[in-house]
Image: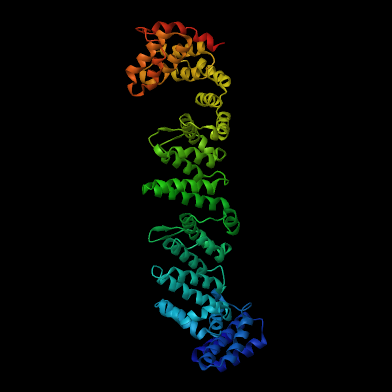
């Protein structure tokens, strides 16, 4: 009953009567939340009247009374709290200039900023609410002049904003970080990470970690945009420190960085900026050296397989060494099938093949032996029957000058797959001190009569062994046969021919030689 009557008196502007009625009713039952609410709103209306006439002491008294009611009164949708805040706001020192400027900043940011610029030298003289208003005026001004403001002025204003120490986290605080990201894109000299430290990474809101849809387009979260720009800037920072500061999953944060780095590499490739692309791969390696496996880590390795080819191929070994063979995930060990049902080899298998191929043609392999041997051992532990991996191990022994170990593995492979012609040649390369065995292996290969294109340097190697054995006609036969098919690579062959006496006559064919020695191959394998 009293509430309705009090409300009606307020509407009629009879504030004295409304106050008297409300106060007396509340005095009889001070615990009634409805009466508390009624008196609160009467005091609110009286504040407006006092404020209009400049009775600021009376306003202070009313505000104190209103504040006392807030914890217990009936306050749907926090309307009372908002009303109190608005009034409290108005009576603070400087509000008579700052609040009109705040309203003006919505339409004319430059004019609004010019009215409050001198206040920024003394931010602590103002209530936190007014400092928040100053922050909004700064933000709207910077947003308005983003592409025209001198870099130094913008950086000073960003610093001035930080000095306001307004309530944080907040929408304004997040918007200022969003502005700094855009500014960093236009001004590479701006140290975004340094500003982030001033901004304080602990002050992210939950909303800052979430993307949203605007006009049917997905807008990345504030955190995603920050990470992307930090990667673009390539500014040094400590990931562990950042991960500890932000209330966000460390693994998810790492994936954001790796995805941004991945896209940066793709971008440079698309722009055909090979130098920048290679640098981006190096930057990725440096950043992720100790960070462990993940989906985007594996995707970036796939990217290296595709992009680091041709004149960039030499960079792959260093990249993978830094990427670390320890970082393969379970998915990387399994083959897959594409949409056309074509089998795709497991990522680990493809990488192992690439490493082997590159090491095979690299003169200085020594710097890669340690990690490659461990990687190969890891692969053979998972797939102990994989014949290609065993072959790689045999060749690694050969490169390490452990030919006794290598020939044991080659014999094992040849007993299982004698039709693999290249194995006979590779095994022969490991028999430096046994010329007879070497000749047997090479003759076995040539007796099978593979295509000439598949023989490689087989005839040259056999010719060298035959010369050492004193079998000059047979050696000359091999060299002349070689020259017929490999004129562009004839230097070594001609050099070997020069070592053969000139009166030596080549045979029409060495087929009898192949047949004779090939018959001992099986015995040699079982020896």
Between 105 and 303, the residue placed more toward the observer is 303
In this rendering, is residue 300 above or below 446? below
Residue 419's spot in the image, x, y percent?
A: 45, 16
In this rendering, is residue 461 above or below 286? above
In this rendering, is residue 406 above or below 243? above
Res 383 → quadrant: top right
Horizontal side of 29 relative to 389 (left or right) equals right
Residue shown at 51% from the left, 16% from the top:
416
Residue 78's spot in the image, x, y percent?
A: 55, 75
Res 247 → quadrant: bottom right
Between 122 and 493, the residue placed more toward the observer is 493
Task: Tell me if residue 514 can be seen.
Answer: no
Residue 20's spot in the image, x, y percent?
A: 60, 92
Res 433 → quadrant: top right
- Image quarter where the C terminus lies is top right
Residue shown at 54% from the left, 53% from the top:
253
- Image quarter where the N terminus lies is bottom right
Residue 180's spot in the image, x, y percent?
A: 47, 65
């Amino acid at each position: 009953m009293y509430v309705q009557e009090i409300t009606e008196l307020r509407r009629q502007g009879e504030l004295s009567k409304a106050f008297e009625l409300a106060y007396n009713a509340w005095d009889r039952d001070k615990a009634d939340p409805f009466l508390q609410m009624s008196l609160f709103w009467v005091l609110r209306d009286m504040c407006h009247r006092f404020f209009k006439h400049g009775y600021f002491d009376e306003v202070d008294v009313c505000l104190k009374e209103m504040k006392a009611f807030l914890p217990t009164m009936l306050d749907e949708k926090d309307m009372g709290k908002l009303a109190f805040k608005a009034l409290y706001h108005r009576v603070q020192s400087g509000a008579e200039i700052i609040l009109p400027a705040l309203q003006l900043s919505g339409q004319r940011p430059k004019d609004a900023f010019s009215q409050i610029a001198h206040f920024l030298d003394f931010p602590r003289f103002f209530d936190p609410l007014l400092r928040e208003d100053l922050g909004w005026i700064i933000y709207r001004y910077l947003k308005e002049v983003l592409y025209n403001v001198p870099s130094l002025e913008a950086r000073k204003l960003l610093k001035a904003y930080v000095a306001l120490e307004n309530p944080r986290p907040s929408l304004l605080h997040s918007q200022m970080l969003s502005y700094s990201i855009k500014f960093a894109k236009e001004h590479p000299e701006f140290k975004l990470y340094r500003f982030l430290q001033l901004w304080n990474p602990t002050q992210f809101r939950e909303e800052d970690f979430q993307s949203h849809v605007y006009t049917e387009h997905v807008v990345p979260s504030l955190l995603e945009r920050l990470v992307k720009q930090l990667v673009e800037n390539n500014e040094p920072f400590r990931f562990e420190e950042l991960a500890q500061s932000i209330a966000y999953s460390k693994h998810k944060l790492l994936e954001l960085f790796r995805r941004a780095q991945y896209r940066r590499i793709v971008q440079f490739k698309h722009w055909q900026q090979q130098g920048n692309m290679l640098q981006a791969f190096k930057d990725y390696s440096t950043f992720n050296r100790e960070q462990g496996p993940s989906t985007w880590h594996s995707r970036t390795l796939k990217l290296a397989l595709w992009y680091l080819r041709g004149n960039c191929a030499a960079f792959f070994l260093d990249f993978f060494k830094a990427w670390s063979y320890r970082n393969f995930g379970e998915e990387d060990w399994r083959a897959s099938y594409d949409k056309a049902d074509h089998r795709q080899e497991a990522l680990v298998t493809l990488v192992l093949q690439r490493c082997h191929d590159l090491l095979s043609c690299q003169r200085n392999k020594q710097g890669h032996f340690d990690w490659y041997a461990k990687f190969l051992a890891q692969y053979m532990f998972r797939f102990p029957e994989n014949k290609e991996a065993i072959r790689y191990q045999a060749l690694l022994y050969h490169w390490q000058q452990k030919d006794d170990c290598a020939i044991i593995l080659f014999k094992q492979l040849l007993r299982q797959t004698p039709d693999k012609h290249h194995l006979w040649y590779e095994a022969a390369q490991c028999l430096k001190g046994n010329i007879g065995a070497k000749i047997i292996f090479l003759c076995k290969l040539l007796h099978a009569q593979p295509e000439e294109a598949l023989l490689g340097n087989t005839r040259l190697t056999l010719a060298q062994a035959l010369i050492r054995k004193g079998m000059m006609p047979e050696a000359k036969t091999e060299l002349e046969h070689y020259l017929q098919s490999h004129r562009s690579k004839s230097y070594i062959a001609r050099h070997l021919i020069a070592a053969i006496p000139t009166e030596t006559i080549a045979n029409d064919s060495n087929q009898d030689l192949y047949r004779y020695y090939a018959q001992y191959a099986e015995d040699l394998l079982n020896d």
